[in-house]
Image (spheres, rainbow, N blue to C red):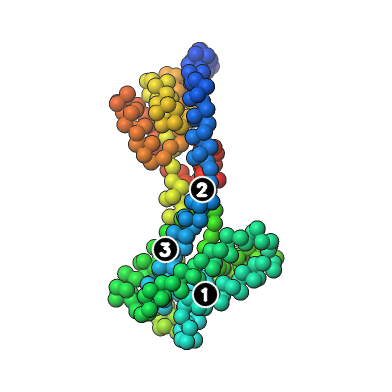
């Protein structure tokens, strides 16, 4: 029994140093420098003009949803837009955009009082930009009526567009402002659980909307509130989704070279042994994009039809060469 249990260890100990020789020894100095620059480029945040452009795209999607789908139906899912929709019903003399200006100006003033300017910088811009885009689209589409005439279809776009916009904005490390400023103040100045506090405010706005617009709209608002939360999380994960690939095949060195030289990615090589066959194997593990993972899968299947490949989704990758939730 003792000899049998030691056999795999003896096989592992019997491997040559050659089998674990790093591929980097095959690189020229120019290739190594090119790989380093590419990894830094992938890890880098967008430059200022890219950041500004992406932030505006996310805010515009949110503003379109407010003007064309939320406001005409009374869909108040919470936040400054939901509060503004409720106020526009109570005080019909002013449009939703005007109330958003008033609320956001108040939140910005509170932010500047209780927070440092650097903390609220992009949130201030986002708050005013969202208010500005809502006012602009209200001017372009002056009639506060449903775009489709179908409340269910309007609800879908009232949820999907802001969720996509928020995911795009969160992906670059910014926010759409508004209640985010209130969340930062609560975080700094109180012991309240921010998530629960903001959810309570959103639920209160939904209940008021149900009273003002009727139970049918109220139920749609409840559906929209929960769908918004799930879709934002799902959209963020989709933007960050990567494939963690593990390959066991007859020629791990060729796979290693393909990953490094053709895909410009790195890999981790781990020695092991097959529990059934008792043979020594080398596992090649690499984190890739969807497209890169497909290229790797095709290459490995052509190289070794009997190769063992596992591909696992991961949305939180922390390390050089990846950006997003890092």
Of the pair 24 and 152, the residue shown nearer to us: 24
The label number, if any, that marks residue 100 in the structure image:
1
Residue 149: percent from the left, percent from the top? Answer: 29, 76
Q: Quick one: label 2, few (<14), some, or many (20+) residues within 10 Å?
A: some
Mark toward the start of the polypeptide (3 vs 1): 3
Is any atom of residue 59 visible in this view?
Answer: yes
Mark toward the start of the polypeptide (3 vs 2): 2
In the displayed structure image, the side of residue 210 where residue 298 appears, left or right:
left
Q: Quick one: label 3, few (<14), some, or many (20+) residues within 10 Å?
A: many
Of the pair 33 and 18, the residue shown nearer to us: 33
Is any atom of residue 82 visible in this view?
Answer: no
Task: Give the secondary structure at mark 2.
Answer: loop
Q: Residue at x 41, y 40 (%)?
A: 289
C-alpha separation, residue under disc 3 versus residue under disc 1? 16 Å
Q: Residue at x 51, y 56 (%)?
A: 52
Decide: marks 3, 2 in contact (CB < 8 A)?
A: no
Mark 2 vs mark 1, foreground winner is 2
Q: Quadrant of residue 186?
A: bottom right
In the displayed structure image, the side of residue 223 where residue 3 appears, left or right:
right
Residue 215: percent from the left, percent from the top? Answer: 40, 81
C-alpha separation, residue under disc 2 versus residue under disc 1? 29 Å
Mark 2 — residue? 46
Mark 3 — residue? 61
Task: Give the secondary structure at mark 3.
Answer: helix
With respect to residue 121, does 205 lie above or below? below
């Amino acid at each position: 029994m003792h000899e049998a249990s030691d056999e795999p260890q003896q096989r592992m100990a019997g491997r040559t140093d050659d089998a674990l020789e790093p591929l980097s020894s095959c690189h020229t100095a120019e290739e190594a420098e090119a790989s380093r620059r590419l990894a830094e480029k992938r890890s880098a945040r967008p430059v200022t003009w890219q950041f500004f452009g992406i932030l505006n795209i996310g805010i515009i999607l949110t503003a379109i949803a407010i003007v064309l789908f939320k406001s005409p139906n009374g869909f108040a899912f919470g936040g400054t837009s939901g509060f503004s929709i409720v106020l526009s019903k109570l005080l019909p003399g002013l449009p939703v955009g005007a109330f958003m200006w008033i609320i956001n100006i108040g939140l910005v003033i509170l932010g500047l009082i209780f927070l440092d300017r650097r903390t609220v910088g992009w949130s201030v811009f986002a708050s005013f930009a969202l208010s500005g885009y809502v006012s602009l689209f209200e001017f372009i589409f002056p009639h506060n009526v449903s775009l489709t005439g179908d409340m269910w279809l309007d609800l879908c776009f009232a949820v999907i567009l802001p969720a996509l916009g928020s995911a795009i904005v969160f992906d670059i490390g910014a926010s759409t402002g508004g209640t985010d400023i209130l969340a930062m103040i609560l975080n700094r100045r109180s012991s309240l659980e921010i998530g629960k506090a903001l959810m309570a405010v959103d639920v209160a706005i939904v209940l008021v909307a149900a009273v003002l617009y009727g139970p049918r709209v109220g139920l749609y608002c409840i559906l929209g509130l929960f769908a918004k939360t799930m879709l934002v999380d799902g959209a963020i994960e989709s933007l960050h989704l990567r494939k963690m690939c593990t390959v066991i095949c007859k020629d791990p060195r060729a796979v290693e070279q393909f990953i490094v030289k053709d895909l410009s990615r790195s890999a981790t090589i781990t020695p092991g042994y097959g529990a059934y066959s008792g043979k020594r194997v080398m596992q090649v593990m690499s984190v890739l994009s969807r497209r890169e993972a497909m290229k790797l899968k095709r290459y490995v299947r052509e190289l070794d039809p009997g190769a063992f490949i596992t591909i696992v989704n991961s949305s939180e990758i922390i390390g050089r060469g990846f950006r997003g939730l890092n």
